[in-house]
Amino acid sequence: QVQLVESGGGLVQAGGSLRLSCASSRNIFTINTMGWYRQAPDKQRELVAAFTSNGSTIHADSVKGRFTISRDYAKNTVYLQMNSLKPEDTAVYYCNAEVVVKHRYEYWGQGTQVTVSS
């Protein structure tokens, strides 16, 4: 079982910045993939950024150059630095983790709201 606790969401004006945090109850060395998704009203949940199983990072085209995923092994925490925010970035942001131990297990955080005003 993995518990993921997100924090850092809020209301910001367009062009502003926020940093989201996702604290894991499990040592993130043992997590295969970990990343951030978002879901805007009436839209499907989409990948924003993630660490893949080989340690590389991926970022959605819509956030490249503006968002950066990072991690702190000592704190078992993954971050999403969001700069140059746009109103279309408004969504609930979810932390996701995948653990593979004989079987694949997927975990989600409770979500944190990010609202960007124009």
Image (spheres, helix red, strand yellow):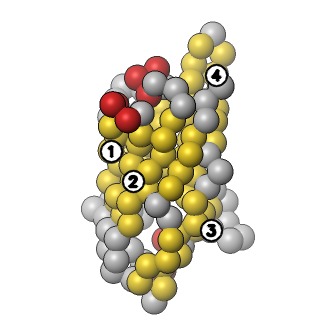
Seen as rendered, the residue at the extreme right is 42
Spatial CA span between label 3 and label 2: 17 Å
Would you place residue 26 above or below residue 113 in this image? Answer: above
Label 1 vs 2, first from the N-terminus: 1
**Callout 4: helix, strand or loop?**
strand
Asked whether the viewer can see residue 22, the reply is: yes
Q: Which amino acid, mark 2? A: Leu
Q: Find disc 1 in the rendering and name its residue.
A: 70
Up-down relation of residue 102 to residue 35 (above or below):
above
Q: What is the quadrant of the N terminus in the image?
A: top right
In which image quadrant can residue 68 be found? bottom left
Which secondary structure, mark 1? strand
Q: Amino acid at mark 1?
A: Ser
Question: Camera-side residue: 28 or 44?
Answer: 28
Callout 1–callout 3 Cβ contact below 8 Å: no
Q: Which secondary structure lies at badge 2? A: strand
Which one is earlier in the sequence, the residue at label 3 or at label 4?
3
CA gap between label 3 and label 4 equals: 27 Å
- Determine which residue is flagged by label 3: 40
Q: Residue at 65% across / 51% down in the picture? A: 110
Which residue occupies the foreground of this view, 92 or 53? 92
Callout 4 amino acid: Arg
Q: Closer to us: mark 3 or mark 2?
A: 2
- Earlier residue among tags 2 and 4: 2
**Residue identifier under label 2:** 80
